Image (spheres, rainbow, N blue to C red):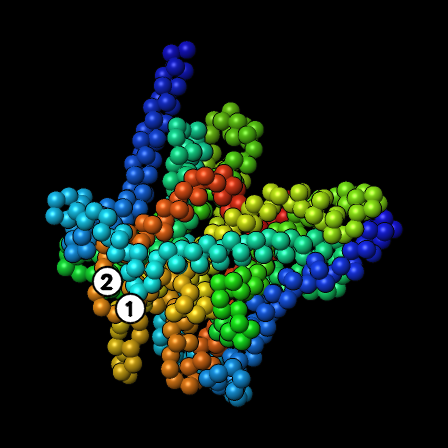
Amino acid sequence: MTKRAKSLAAERRRKTTLSVVLAVICVIYVLPVVSVLINSFKKNTYVKTDTFALPTGDMWAGFDNFKTGMTFGNYPFLKSVLYSVIITILSTFLILLFTSMAAWYIARVNSFVCKIFYYLCVFSMVVPFQMVMFTLSKTADTLKLNTPWTIPIVYLGFGAGLAIFMFVGFVKSIPVEIEEAASIDGCGPLRTYFMVVLPMLKPTMISVGILEIMWIWNDYLLPSLVLDINKYRTIPIHIQYLKGSYGTVDLGATMALILMSIIPVIVFYLICQKYIIKGVAAGAVKG
Amino acid sequence: MKKGIFKNPLRRWGWLFLGPMAIAFIIGFVWPFFQGIFLSFCKFKIVTKATFVGFDNYVKAIKDASFMHSFWYTALFAVVSLVLINVLAFTVAYLLTQGIKGSNLFRTVFFMPNLIGGIVLGYIWSMIFDGVLSMFDTSILLESKYGFWGLIILMCWQQIGYMMIIYIAGLQAVPEDMLEAAKIDGATKTQTLFRVVIPNVMPSITICTFLSLTNGFKLFDQNLALTGGLPFEIQPDGSSIKTTEMLALNIYNTFSGSSISAHGTAQAKAVLFFILVAAIGLVQLGITRKREVQQ
């Protein structure tokens, strides 16, 4: 008996030690984000020399960095936030709607054309963006897809692969009889889709939506090549161009901008954590 | 028979269901892809004025010292990051499935860096590395080994959480009775780990290995934001190469080059890059498919 009690106590001690070790690692893990927070309140000249010091005394800049950050880089920060939001929401909406419709059609009709599109989509998942980077930006230019309101079409095209793959996989797993029943009851294909199929697709919709939002929100190269940079900038483009421009860079203001751009992402993550982790796991296993 | 009743009405709606996605897919992928392959055999400054030159571009691409340097640099980076990320992610996942307190909180924290975009990550870390290195009067832009390990640290920070999620899913699927049987047979913790747990999570290991390999090869944003390829190194023949420039960045920089033949060479490089990445992807697909059949 005592032996067993001893081993249980040892087990508990081991687990507590593990918890402490992991907690320490966790603190180290968030340090980069914390240092962004610290430095966004620090005067520019001290960011490089006293990166890890708290912004006290002379170093304290208050909210000055945030104020200068708003117009820093000759482009209003809020405008780039607005464009990022527009592009992300519009593209994700288009992708979810049209790829799920196409996936249903592909899975149910399964004609020769469907098969061609399906395999092209699967194939497109292994093609790196650099392969089509030049020709895609030229095509988008010719077709006037270079504004925040039309670039979602480019995202729908280039991002269709994974979405189609995941939706087709899911549609194949739902029994066709449910749709047949709807069709016998007099539902046309359009109503069958929106009233019967779409509600069943919800879990996959969330997974695909999360993956697309994460990709499009953070994407730098595609919008920087397709959009007219002087007029339209997304957050990643804006931040890249702060350093790209000549002259000394205001590091304090840069950190303030970085902080403002990651806070919404972290809030979004904390709210939808369950779905995000599930979506990522689903996308990884399949892609 | 049954299917026939249902299929017919839907067939006529192809223009609505398949149409929008098909058009966008042709604009966004199919046309640029085939045009890209065609242009890799051409000399061009603008797309409409291309003259066929055969394999010239490919010869130039392979002879380009900066391209070959970036290839080996990328390969080394991909392998080192693959080993580090997977070993660390597996360890963390293993610890988090031991039923210790606060597992959920730890998981949340470890996964967080994944949501931050590559460009932003690059600038966060360049500030941190410069903060540390400035104490030694140097900078991440001055020595290529700092750039290499800096990028490794950055990628570990970002990717460990992602791989950890996949490993946790795999570890949770290990049959409970197998673990119990091992315990009853008197297997030690280490024996159980290597003889029971790891063989059971092999599918997850395969997925993560290939994911980190392709991620390593395709890396662009972080590379651009952290070092942008700096520092330069002057070659014996007078040309200069960027020592921390990876494949994707090298292709990007070749496209922005000003000489008339640069675009063709860049497109040829892009095709070679595509073949490399696609080959890795197809091997992965083959392996995961095979496993599915076995099950």
Residue drawn where x is 34% and y is 68% of the image: B245
Left or right: B26, with B83 as reference point: right
Q: Position of residue B35 (x, y in %)?
A: 56, 77
Q: Secondary structure at mark 1?
A: loop
Q: Position of residue A245 (x, y in %)?
A: 29, 68
Q: Quadrant of residue A160?
A: bottom right
Residue drawn where x is 31% and y is 46% of the image: A33
Please, is residue A12 above or below residue B110 in the view?
A: above
Q: Chain of mark 1?
A: A
- Please name the residue that numbered disc 2 is placed on: A249
- Is the Cβ of the residue at disc 1 closer than 8 Å to that at disc 2? yes
Residue drawn where x is 51% and y is 51% of the image: A211
Please, is residue B210 above or below residue A280 in the view?
A: below
Nearest the viewer among A107 and A187 is A187
Residue type indicated by callout 2 = Val
Q: Quadrant of the N terminus of chain A?
A: top left
- Please name the residue that numbered disc 1 is placed on: A245
